[in-house]
Image: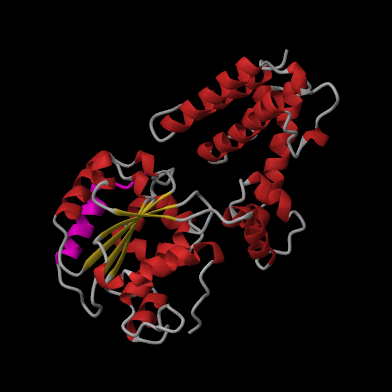
Amino acid sequence: MAVPEMLSWQQANWESFTASLENLHHGQIVTAPAGHGLREFCLAMAQYVLCSDIDPQRNTWCGECQNCRLFSAGTHPDFHVVCNEVESVQGRIGTIGQYSYRYQDESVREKKSQLRKVIPIDHIRALIENFMQRPHIARRKVGLILPADRLNINAANALLKLLEEPPEDSLLILLSSEPSRLPPTVLSRCVRIHLPAPSHEQARTWLEGQTASEDIDLALELTDGAPFRAREICETGLLQTQKDLLKGLVGVCRRTASPYQVSSSLNKLDFEEVIKWLQGFVMDMIRWKTAGKIPWWHASAEQDLMPERFSGEKLFQVYDRLCGYRRIARGSLNEELALDTLFLSIQQTVQ
C-alpha cells in the first residue's frame, strides 16, 4: 500500500502536527482557502493518528498495519465522518463519501429534490453516541466534521458539549474554509491549524503532474491560485463555463447581451460558486479602475469597455451586494431573482 507524499506547501504544518502527537488537543480546527488541499491534509491527520506502526523516518503512517488497511478500505470502526449531503455525494474524495454514509439515510436522501447543504443536529447526536464508546481497535476514536461552518445552530450547540466534555482517547477534527461562520464558543475550544496557500510555482508544478490541460495558468488565475479547484475546473468543463460567463459579462456591460439571458444560463450551477465568479469579475474591474491593474481577460473586451466608462462608486456598491448575497446564500433566498438583479446592477455600472 503506497503512502502518498505530503503536499509541499503543507510540509511545515505536517511536521508541527506530528511532533505534537503525544500531547494532542482533543479538538482541532483546520482552516484553508477552498481548493488548497484542506481535506487531503485532514485525512492524513486521521490516518496518522489511527496508525499503530508510525514510520518515524518518513514521518507518516505505515500503510501496512490493520488500522491503515481498514482505513483505506473505508471500514475502520474508529473513524467517523460527519458532513452535509452535498459533500457526501458530490465531494471529490471517495473516502469521505464512504465513511459519511454511516450518518446518512440514503433512502430518505434520494426522495429529495436537492441535496442538503447544512449538517443537522441528529448527525452530531449520533457522533456523540459513538464517541461515548471506547475505541474498537485503535488508540483513539477520530471524527472529521466538514465543512464545519455548515453546522446549523442546534448542531453547533450539541458539538460544543462534546468539545467541553470530550471522552478519553478521542480526537475531533473540524474542517472549514470559512471559520468566521462558526460560533466563537466552538472556535475557542479548539486548537487552530491554518494551512497556507501554495506559491504560484508550487501550485503550477503540482498541477502539471495532475492534468494534461493547456490552460493551467488560466485555471489558476480563475481560482485564485487554488490548485485542487484549478484541477477540477480543467477536468469538469467548468473552465469553459467560466470563459462563457466572462464573455457574457462583457456583453452585458457593452449592452450587446441581455443580463436576464446570461443570468438564466447559470441557474443550474451552484449559486455560491457563481457569486464567487462575479466577485472576481467586479474586483478585477475595481482594480483596473482604481489602480490600473489590467485584468487577464482585458483582451476579450473591446476598446469601448475601458475602466474610464465604469463608475467606481457603483462597482463598490455591486461588490457589497455580492458579499451580502454570499452571506445569506445558505438561508432562504430566491437565487434566480438575485442573479437577475446582480447582472442588471453590473450593467448599470457602465456609464
Residue farthest to the right? 303
Vertical placement of 85 versus 58: above or below? above
Measured as percent of width and height from the top left, residue 188 is found at: 25, 46
Residue drawn where x is 75% and y is 28% of the image: 250
Which part of the image, by quadrant, shows the C terminus? top right
User: Does the rendering let one see residue 74?
Assistant: yes
* Magenta-tinted stretch: 118-132
Give how far across and how far down residue 46 sits, in percent. Answer: 35, 69
The mark total stands at 0
Which residue is found at the position 55% from the left and 34% from the top? 275
Task: Choose between 257 and 59: the one closer to the eye.
Answer: 59
> Can you give x and y, in whole percent of width and height, for residue 298 in the image?
79, 34
- Residue 98 in view (yes/no): no
Is 27 drawn above or below residue 350 in the view shown? below
Quadrant assignment, res 167: bottom left
- In this view, the residue in front, 204 or 300, is 204
Position in image of residue 22 (x %, y %) = 26, 73
Query: Does the magenta portion include 130?
Result: yes
Please, is residue 60 above or below residue 314 in the view?
below
Residue 45: quarter of image: bottom left
Q: Residue 53 falls in which quadrant of the image? A: bottom left
User: Is residue 280 in the magenta section?
Assistant: no
Q: How is the image coloured?
A: secondary structure
Q: Main secondary structure of the magenta part?
A: helix
74 is higher (above) or lower (below) than 188: below
In the displayed structure image, the side of residue 308 where residue 313 appears, left or right: left
